[in-house]
Amino acid sequence: MQDALGNLVSTVVSPNIGTAEFFVAVLVACGLVMIAISSLLPKATADDLEWWER
């Protein structure tokens, strides 16, 4: 149990390349989801941009 806790702490405190890549992938995925949601929302009446220009 203590070894697992030590591994967890060492992973959080000093992330290796795999952990950094995971966090970057999560951030990119969240950005793509937000872009997809915003493109599906109806645009305002004063907005002259088309959906692909937003």
Image (spheres, grey):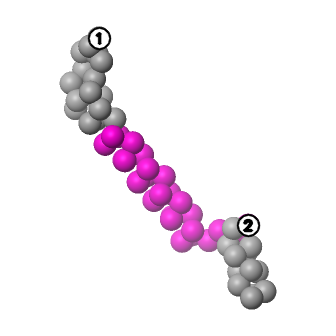
Residue 35 appears in which quarter of the rendering? top left
Q: Residue at x 36, y 47 (%)?
A: 32
SS assignment at label 2: helix
Name which residue lies at 48% across and 52% down: 27
Residues in magenta? 13-37
What's the CA distance linking mark 1 and mark 2? 48 Å
Three-letter amino acid code at the position of disc 1: Ala
Pick whichever, 54 or 43, lies toward us: 43
Disc 2 marks which residue?
13
- For the N terminus, give its image quadrant: bottom right
Disc number for residue 22: none
Residue 40, compared with residue 27, is above or below; it is above
Q: Relative to 8, say whether 44 is above or below.
A: above
| Amino acid type of the residue that numbered disc 2 sits on in the rendered structure | Val
Is 40 placed above or below 28 here? above
Q: Is residue 14 magenta?
A: yes
Which is more toward the observer, 18 or 43? 43
Secondary element at image label 1: loop
Left/right of residue 44 with respect to residue 21 in the rendered view:
left
Answer whether residue 32 is magenta in the image.
yes
Dot label at residue 46: 1
Left or right of 47 in this view: 1:
right
